[in-house]
Amino acid sequence: MASVRSSARPLGRIETMTRTLVLSGAGRYADPWHAFPRTSARIRDVLGDLGHDVEVSEDVEERMADLSDIDLLVVNVGCPDEPESAGLAAARDGLLAFVARGGALLSVHVSATSFPTLPEWEAVVGGRWVRGQTMHPPIGTAQVRVLPTGHPVTAGLADFELHDERYSYLRTAADLTVLAEHDHDGRSHPLVWVRESSSGRVAYDALGHGVESYDSEPRRQLLANEARWLLGG
């Protein structure tokens, strides 16, 4: 699949649409555990309802190499079965150029495992899945605790539950603002965090294993809030 576009313009909106790209796991960025076409479609629907012009692309590295036409990048991909490829260097350069010019980035769920040979990915996102350290309890009902930060991403949200995976023992940077977490093995683990610099805004959202996650209204509201904040709202 090359790309699929979807857009929605609420009545009365006259400003230029936000150009959003959802990178969806396919080919070497797919895996047997995640239905990327379905979850990426749910992300597209939520952001389309906000008025975004949304492109969903499975050409992960090729599309990442040139993000000059994109305002918000959402990465919903798996860990490549072969870490290196001919297009990886160009994808790295495209990502770093996007971030440097202030592009907004949202990394979703299993994307924390991706690009294992690019330290720049972890440096930008602020954390990653570490093989042999990170894990998740069996998928099922997950209790999400919203921290009392007053941050716009969690505005209007109270603690909630949904059907999802709960990533635990992620490796995280020290400068993150953690907005939501869960408890496992007697300790708290971050599920949602943001970071902001002079270049722009980045968010990581560990939720979103399957479409069941996006059946949760608080989870959809969280995604919408993330997009608004990332774009300066």
Image (tube, rainbow, N blue to C red):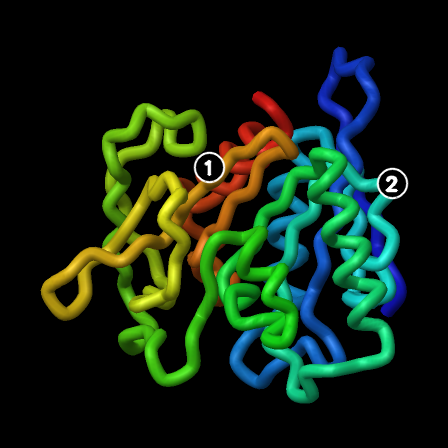
> In the picture shown, does residue 197 fall above or below 217?
above
* SS at circle 2: loop
Instruction: Using the numbered discs, state the Cα–Cα distance from disc 1 to disc 2 in whole angstroms.
Output: 26 Å
Q: Quadrant of residue 88?
A: bottom right
Q: Residue at x 87, y 52 (%)?
A: 66
Please name the residue shown 61% across and 53% down the image: 42
Residue located beneath label 1 in the image: 221
In the image: residue 91, left or right of residue 119: right
Query: Between tags 1 and 2, which lies in front?
Result: 2
Q: In the rendered image, which quarter contains the C terminus?
A: top right
Q: Are marks 1 and 2 in contact (CB under 8 Å)?
A: no
* Residue 69 numbered tag: 2
- Please name the residue shown 41% across and 45% down the image: 193
Mark 2 packing: few (<14 Cα in 10 Å), some, or many (20+)?
Answer: few
Identify the residue shown where x is 26% and y is 58%: 189
Task: Please provide percent x and percent y for residue 90.
Answer: 84, 64
- Which quadrant would residue 142 be assigned to in this image? bottom left
Disc 1 marks a residue whose amino acid type is Gln
Residue 225 drawn at (x, y percent): 50, 32
